[in-house]
Image (tube, rainbow, N blue to C red):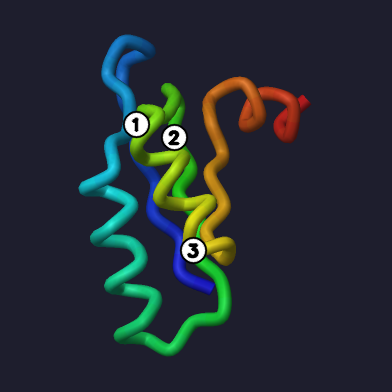
């Protein structure tokens, strides 16, 4: 698994370009899964791209808070 963390303000969402870079890293390293964890959220295009590949997990600030609780 490859994991990328983004500490962004709530108004600054992770975009599809970040997901593309992660997918590239996943392929280069031969990882079965990939995950981006952010303190903010994701653009619609980022979610769509992650869904298209199916092996990319997106953890947003709310989910991160629930996991930490």
Q: Which residue is at 32% across, 24% downward?
A: 13
Near-viewer residue (25 or 47): 47
Among the two numbered marks 2 and 3 on one chain, the one whose residue lies closer to the N terminus = 2
**Relative height, residue 7 to residue 10 (above, below):** below
Helix, strand, or loop for circle 3? helix
Which residue occupies the foreground of this view, 43 or 68? 43
Of mark 1 and mark 3, the one earlier in the sequence is 1
Mark 1 highlights which residue? 7
Q: Which percent across, then down, holds residue 54?
A: 57, 62
Give the CA separation, mark 2 to mark 3: 19 Å
Image spot of residue 41 (x, y percent):
44, 25
Marks 2 & 1, CB-CB < 8 Å contact = yes
Foreground mark, 2 or 3, reads 3
Q: Which residue is mark 3?
A: 53
Q: Which residue is mark 2?
A: 38
Which mark is on residue 64?
Answer: none
Q: Residues within 10 Å of mark 2 (few under 14, many from 20)?
A: many
Number of the front mark, 1 or 3: 3
In the image, 49 versus 62, the foreground residue is 49
User: Whole-Å distance between the Cαs marked 1 and 3?
Assistant: 24 Å
Is the C-beta separation of discs 2 and 3 under 8 Å? no
């Amino acid at each position: 698994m490859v994991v990328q963390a983004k500490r962004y303000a709530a108004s600054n969402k992770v975009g599809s370009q970040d997901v593309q870079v992660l997918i590239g890293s996943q392929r280069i390293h031969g990882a079965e899964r990939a995950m981006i964890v952010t303190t903010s959220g994701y653009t619609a295009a980022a979610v769509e791209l992650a869904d298209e590949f199916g092996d990319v997990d997106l953890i947003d600030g709310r989910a991160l808070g629930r996991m930490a609780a």
